[in-house]
Amino acid sequence: MDRDGLTTAAKDGAPSGQTPRVSLVGAGPGDPDLLTVKALRCIEQADVILYDNLVSDAIRALFPKSTTTLFVGKAKNCHSIGQDRLNEVIVELAQKGLHVCRLKGGDPFIFGRGSEEMLRLHQAGIQTEVVPGITAASGCTSYAGIPLTHRGLAQACTFVTGHAQSGDAGPDIDWQGLARGNQTLVFYMGLSQLPKITTELAAQGMPLDTPAALIEQGCRPEQRVIASQLSQLVQDSQIHQLQSPTLIVIGEVVSLADQLAWFGPLTQSSMPQALSA
């Protein structure tokens, strides 16, 4: 298998007359039991699987041994393959008549760049389908015992990416809007930006004692949940030496975690409580 994904299987092609097809599949947050029936079917029937860094080992263990697989994951400042080249590889594989399973952690259309890949595939006239997956904000908070909404505490939830996509500064974040109460904030891929996140929200008036949580390796046996508050998130992330993937949850609903935790232990912050702003 070469680095660009032009595998032996791809070069051999598929039976003549087969319609090129790509399935953009959400693998969910890590627990293989959270795969949809259709996602598992796509994995089992694919000719080639291109999978991301956030696809867990437990899900990778479900890959058929006879299926060609290619790791195309991305981490901060470390990409196994650039997005533009990846788009072309998917097109090339599909044009050879292969059924391509493009497997992504979470949901393909929530910070997964699945829409970018689908736009390129449609430009090439390739039949494509999307198989939604459970996104981390839903799966990881549920496994942590944190409801995204709760009567009297939060009537809305907002998902925010913790960093801009490569090569795109993206729109400015509306920190003032995020700091308003009665909602739950969930930051994806934001661990390295935690000081900025907490500083900006506090500057816009969010109380320093707003409940918050850090969820590392959510929905997996290694899951760790640190219950904290806005003023202590940075220190707690350092004390517990949290690593990616870690989800940041901020809002009053976090206060329910000690009553609703069911999947694993909840670690309370070891930092002294700060006064509200």
Image (cartoon, grey):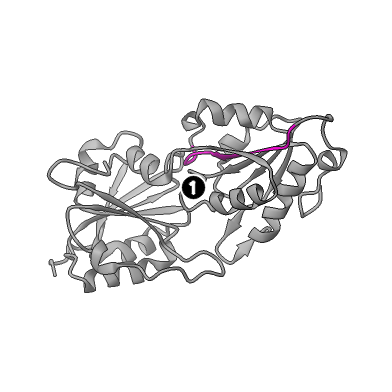
Q: Which residue is mark 1?
A: 109
Q: Percent x, y for residue 25?
A: 56, 39
- Is residue 171 left or right of 251 when viewed as pictured? right
- Is residue 269 depicted above or below 225 in this figure? below
What residue occupies the far right of the structure in this picture? 12
Q: Is residue 76 left or right of residue 200?
A: right
Residue 242 seen by the camera: yes
Compared to residue 41, the image places residue 129 above or below, namely: below
Type of the residue with mark 1 = Phe
Magenta segment: does it hold 26? yes
Taking depth in this image into account, of 26 and 188 the one nearest to the observer is 26
Q: Which residues are magenta?
A: 19-30
Residue at 67% across / 58% down in the picture?
80
Residue at image location 46% in from the left, 31% down from the top: 34
Q: In the figure, is residue 83 to the left or right of 218?
A: right
Image quarter of residue 24: top right
Answer with left or right where residue 64 lies relative to residue 202. Answer: right
| Crowd tier of the residue under label 1, counting other residues whose Cα lies within 10 Å: few below 14, some 14–19, many 20 or above | some
Mark 1: secondary structure: loop
Name the residue located 20 percent from the left edge and 38 percent from the top edge.
Answer: 259
